[in-house]
Each structure stands twice: as C-alpha cells, then as structure tokens.
Image (tube, rainbow, N blue to C red):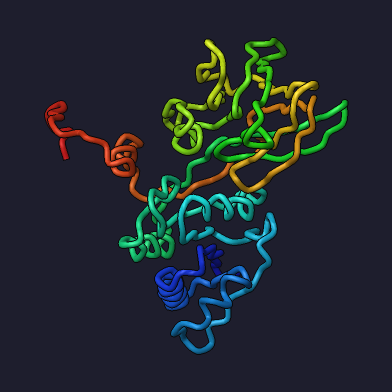
C-alpha cells in the first residue's frame, strides 16, 4: 500500500506561518503521513527546526500537482485556499483550510485548532462536501480568447478607472438589461460572501446551487442582483463601440477583453471539494466570521448553545 500523503500549501513570508508549517510537518511525520510541498514555500520552512531525515516530496504547484494526495492542507487565508484549489480541483483532492489570515471565510478552522485538524486528518475523521464552480468562456469576433473557471466569482470589469464599462446581460439566450457600470460579477454561492457581498449581492447558503449576477456601481434604475438557476446560461457582452474590459476569475486568472467581447458563464463541470470537520451550520459560520450581533436571541427550547 502506498504511504498516505498530504500536500501542504502555505502563505509563506511571515515567521508565525513558517513556525506553524514546521509544527504541522513534525506532527504529520510523527504520524507516518508523508508530506508533499511546493518548492518555493518549503525553502522558507526548511530553515526552521525540523526533524533530521524529514524529506518531503517537492512539486511545482501546477494544476493537478495534488494528484494522489489524500488532502491539500492550506495554511493561510482565502487567497491561499483559492491558489491551492488550482492544484486540487482537476484531480478531485479535497482542501482543508486553516485560517492564518483575517476573515478566512473558506477556511474550515482557525490557527488555534490546527492540532485538532491534524488529528482529524491522521484519524480520517472528516467529511467532504462539494462546492459548485463556474465554467467561463470568453469570445471575441467568433473566436475563443479565454477558457477558464472560478470557485468564487468571475468578474467583468472596466479596464481603466476613468472609463465606464457598457454591458448587456443575457440569461438563457435572452437579453435582460443593459447599463454602464464599473463591472458585473457572476458568483457562486461560495463566492456570495466574497467580492459579490462587497458589491451588494445576497448571502447564499452553500447548499443552494445558483448563479448570482451582481452589478458593481451600475448607472441604471434596474441593476439589482439576480439569483439564477444553476442550469441557466449567463452571458455578459461588452459594448463593441465602448472600451476594453478585464475578465478576472477569483483574483487568480485574468484575461484582456477587447470591445465586443462576450463572456459566457455556466455551472462548472468540475466542483471543488472542501473538508468539513465539525458540521456546524452555515449560520454559525456567518455569525463567527462577520461578528454579527445576535444578542437577545432566545430560540426554541434546546437550541441555544
């Protein structure tokens, strides 16, 4: 039987993060779980106090490099997890996020619970849930100029600050609205707590599968966020007589959009898999991450806790 292996993805460059990564490496080695690492990150961790003979497998961070790993353990914030998702999504390996940043909404646990997270990996005490993604295709003059994906959102935004982006929105082959704006976001329920939330979109429970269409600073009377069937096809068309735009997916994959470009968005064929440890409801996560006021809640008998 092949040895169990965990891919470690780290937000390096901060001493506390390196110390946490070194502690994780020691714990996994002691439990007989082999470590796989990204070379540029491990070069920083290797300077810490590590056991002699701990020689992890070094990979280059390309999409799919998590192939064969049991879990991708992510030490960092949401940006680090989105980066790690590129290594894991093509091969179906689940991600377990440990938040070393600020909000860290995608992370499953916090830094002070990292030992519990390692125990759960070693003992196999975790569940995996799938999060829908977006499939994104950009076309111009009949040719495909970009084909990519997103876990949180795909944003079509104006290319320069001083210009207004003119767009037409389409759902299932029919025009819905046209307006000038700073941009338009198509988000997943997972992304409803990220950029789409900042742009005024609704919070959507991750168990709800839907496409969210959220205008950003639109100059129009009808430019409200829309919640659309996950089976629908959404398109954002850039005015051919207007200005160029930018397609940005998860802040990770960016493409130039000439005037006249068309971005088509559908449910992605390949989901992202996330590790869940405690089974707490999404409502509890909202309250904890956003520090929401709940004083005065009484609830039904037996529900307080």
- Residue shown at the point (47%, 46%) measured from the top left: 128
Q: Residue furthest bottom?
A: 52
In this rendering, is residue 118 above or below 187?
Answer: below
In the depicted structure, whether residue 98 falls above or below residue 221: below
| Residue 11: % across, % down | 50, 63
Q: Report the side of 52 relative to 142 (left or right).
A: left
Q: Is residue 159 visible to the viewer in this orientation of the structure? A: yes
Residue drawn at x 60%, y 36% as measured from the top left: 133
Above or below, 75 relative to 294: below
Q: Pick the quarter of the image with the C terminus.
A: top left
Task: Name the residue: 73% across, 24% down.
Answer: 238
Name the foreground residue: 63 vs 32.
63
Q: Nearest the camera: 117 or 287?
A: 287
Total tally of numbered discs in the picture: 0
Res 143 quadrant in image: top right
Residue 274 % position (x, y)? 49, 47
Outermost residue on the front side: it is 162
Residue 63 spot, x, y in % from top left: 68, 55
The residue that appears at 42% across and 50% down in the rendered structure is 104
Which of these two is toward me, 141 or 44? 141
Residue 174 in which image quadrant: top right
The answer to whether residue 212 shows anywhere in this view is: no
Residue 27 spot, x, y in % from top left: 41, 74
- Of residues 263 and 261, the one nearer the viewer is 261
Q: Residue furthest right?
A: 142
Left or right for 188, reference 126: right
Q: Is residue 45 above or below residue 258?
A: below
Q: Quadrant of the N terminus?
A: bottom right
In-image side of 188 versus 114 (left or right): right
């Amino acid at each position: 039987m092949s040895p169990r292996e965990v891919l470690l993805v780290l937000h390096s460059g901060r001493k506390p993060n390196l110390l946490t990564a070194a502690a994780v490496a020691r714990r996994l080695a002691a439990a007989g779980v082999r470590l796989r690492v990204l070379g540029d990150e491990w070069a920083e961790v290797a300077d810490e106090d590590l056991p002699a003979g701990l020689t992890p497998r070094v990979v280059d961070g390309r999409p799919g490099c998590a192939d064969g790993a049991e879990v991708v353990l992510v030490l960092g914030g949401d940006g680090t997890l989105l980066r790690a998702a590129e290594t894991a999504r093509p091969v179906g390996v689940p991600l377990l996020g440990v938040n070393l940043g600020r909000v860290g909404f995608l992370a499953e646990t916090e830094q002070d619970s990292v030992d519990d997270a390692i125990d759960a990996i070693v003992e196999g005490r975790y569940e995996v849930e799938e999060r829908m993604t977006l499939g994104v295709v950009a076309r111009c003059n009949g040719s495909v100029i970009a084909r990519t994906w997103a876990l949180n959102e795909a944003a079509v935004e104006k290319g320069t600050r001083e210009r207004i982006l003119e767009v037409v929105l389409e759902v299932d082959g029919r025009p819905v609205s046209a307006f000038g704006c700073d941009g338009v976001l198509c988000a997943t329920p997972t992304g409803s707590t990220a950029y789409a939330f900042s742009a005024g979109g609704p919070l959507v429970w991750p168990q709800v599968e839907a496409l969210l269409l959220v205008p950003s600073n639109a100059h129009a009377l009808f430019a409200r966020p829309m919640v659309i069937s996950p089976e629908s096809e959404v398109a954002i068309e850039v005015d051919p007589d207007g200005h160029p735009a930018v397609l940005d997916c998860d802040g990770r994959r960016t493409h130039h959009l000439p005037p006249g470009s068309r971005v088509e968005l559908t449910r992605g064929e390949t989901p992202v898999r996330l590790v869940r440890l405690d089974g707490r409801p999404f409502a509890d996560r909202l309250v904890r991450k956003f520090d929401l006021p709940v004083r005065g809640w009484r609830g039904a008998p037996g529900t307080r806790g």
